[in-house]
Image (cartoon, rainbow, N blue to C red):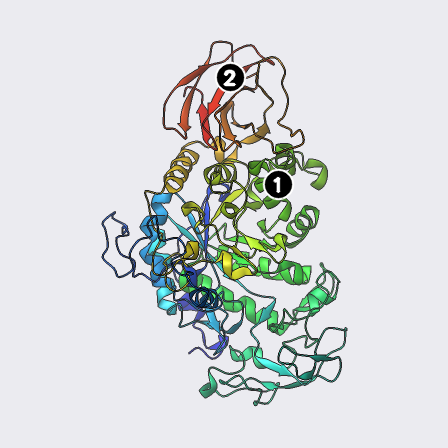
Amino acid sequence: MIERLSDVDWTSLTTGPFHPSPSSWADQVLYFLVVDRFSDGRENGYRDVNGQPVAGTTPPFTTGDEENAVGTETDAAKWRDAGGSWVGGTLDGVRSKLGYLRRLGVTALWISPVLRQRAGSNDYYGHGIQNFLEVDPNFGTADDLRALVREAHDNGLRVVLDVVLNHTGDVFAYDADRYHTVDASGRHVLDPRWDGQPYQVRGWRDPMGAPTLPFPAPVDALWADAAVWPAELQRDGTYTCRGRIANWDYDPEYREGDFFGYKDVHHGVGGLDDYRPSAALQTLTMAYQYWIAFADLDGFRVDTVKHMDPGATRFFTSAVHEFAQFIGKDRFFLVGEITGPRSFAVDLLQTTGLDAALGLGEVQANLEGLVRGVAAPKDYFDLFRNSALIGQGSHTWLGDHVVTSYDDHDQVRQGEQKSRFAAGPDGAALASAVLAVNVLTLGIPCVYYGSEQRFDGHGGSDRYIREAMFGGAFGPFRSRGRHCFDETNPIFTELAALLAIRGEELALRRGRQYLREISGDGASFGFPVGFGGPIRSLVAWSRILAGREVVCAVNTDPASWRTAWVTLDAGLHAVGDRYAYRHRSDGLPGTVEVAPRNGLAIEVTVPPAGVAVLVPPP
């Protein structure tokens, strides 16, 4: 174990060589996976990086396996309980599926936090870090992480690691002196909730979780499972010690308070331009610089940015970008989880130096609403016409500054009842359409693991949208013992086809974007709107780069074919020009002719809940 950052041989660590950054992150497609829920490497019949079948012990999921784990209430309770703790996914399991991911067409993996959790913790997601210089043994070893990144690079994939700066695990206990309450077992206890004043601390937690070790005080290395590591974090002043957050929207409470049992780190003091980072923030920053060099990582997803001082975020982004450039990673990617309105996120991006924002509820809600037909398509597309919001001249500024998605691991915007897209009304039928909008519109698209297999998790907590792709005791579709790495699934194959086109067409990655007016009769044109019910229509948009206009369309009607005239840029075409279907969900080729309607337009036909991409001649 590395006890102190001062023990690290930085000269040797930064010798390299290192994998270079991409020319633009706008070209990338992220795939977000929860390591504990993705793969244990034991699946039977999946294909390796060379496309060859691999023998294993877990059979593939087939029709009829749905709900095989919930036949009785006893079985259902076991299945639910299994979802609340570790189920066995590993870094080596992820490494075994690099061929699957490469053939899907994603270009960068975003993996959940993997650093060592407090002993005895059920935090399989990885937010309760106890040692910032070790990989949690449930996931594997530091060498397993390095091997995953190396082989991902060999297969054309980059790796973005989810990192936590705001807090550590529950590594000490308070000696609370106010706010009487009753706990879940009916005992009268003192509740250390935030009121702006610090609490006394009873002690560091020992390996059994009891607060028996003096705090703040150095801990002997024999107690590697106790307190917090590296040793530099055991100093006085590392934590705010102000108790748990009760009001998640009150500042400074949401910046100073603890996330439930996690313990908030004191980052420093001062305004944005004169921020003075604490020793703890400097230590955490160096620890993550260590992992950049050790594992050759390509980016970080920074957790809970809203709950950090803007000055702390700026310090971290500046230090990480500088270190990454020093070792040859000129565009090391820093994407921040920024909850709240879009204007808040844009402001934080510009003032802190983050490269992109993740977790914009407006983007997720409007993307999902567009495809379900419950929100006007204009609501989604107007989110990217942001020149008035940020004072930028180009409405494509957000193109490589926002990571777009709809499904994710916690669905904060949904409140207490969580669900994946496919679990909602018509969600299963529209699974390809929602992925198409996600990956063919502006932004850096992110696919949440299992969406390409039409996962439909839903329930009263996060666990139900974190199914184990490899089966085990908490498999998808309320199953157990069946894996879902099926490369013949029609959602997988259609997404792979769309991502291949995205890779070939620069306009789909970097082009300007326009929602297009449509018409059923070729005479009356307008944007799709609802009339007292769901919008069942073609939704079409153009991506334009250097005079090349690519037209995309989805059909939000899961039951019927839809045909409509789609407006084009009249300055780029002439009557009689032809467009070809580069992709349509029924697989049939075809061409259409540019006609003099609403300026200029083409007639597009899309199958129920389907997708079409049309291109002009080269």
Badge 2 crowding class, 10 Å Cα cut-off, few under 14, some 14 to 19, many 20 or more, is many
What residue do we see at 59% from left, 36% from top? 370
Relative to 449, residue 523 above or below: above
Foreground: 396 or 371? Answer: 371
Q: Is residue 584 shown left or right of residue 127? A: left
Kindly identify the amino acid type of the residue bearing the numbered disc 2. Ile
The dot on residue 453 is none
Q: Is residue 237 shown left or right of residue 453? A: right
Foreground: 450 or 223? Answer: 450
Please tell me whether mark 1 sits on a helix, a strand or a loop. helix
Which residue is label 1 attached to?
366
Relative to 29, residue 556 above or below: above
Kindly identify the amino acid type of the residue bearing the numbered disc 1. Asn
Relative to 192, residue 309 above or below: above
Q: Tag 2 or tag 1, which sits nearer the N-term?
A: 1
Q: Is residue 353 visible?
A: no
Q: Is the N terminus in the top left, top right, bottom left or bottom right quadrant?
A: bottom left
The reply to whether dot 1 and dot 2 touch (C-beta < 8 Å) is no
* Extreme residue in the front direction: 72
- Quadrant in the picture for residue 173: bottom right
What residue do we see at 36% from left, 24% from top? 588
Q: Is residue 182 shown left or right of residue 586? A: right
Please tell me whether mark 2 sits on a helix, a strand or a loop. strand
Can you give x and y, in whole percent of width and height, for residue 463 in the image? 51, 61
What is the total number of numbered labels drawn onto the structure image? 2
Which residue is label 2 attached to?
602
Relative to 569, residue 374 above or below: below
Can you give x and y, in whole percent of width and height, for residue 309 in the image? 68, 62
What residue do we see at 49% from left, 38% from top? 430
Foreground: 421 or 274? Answer: 421
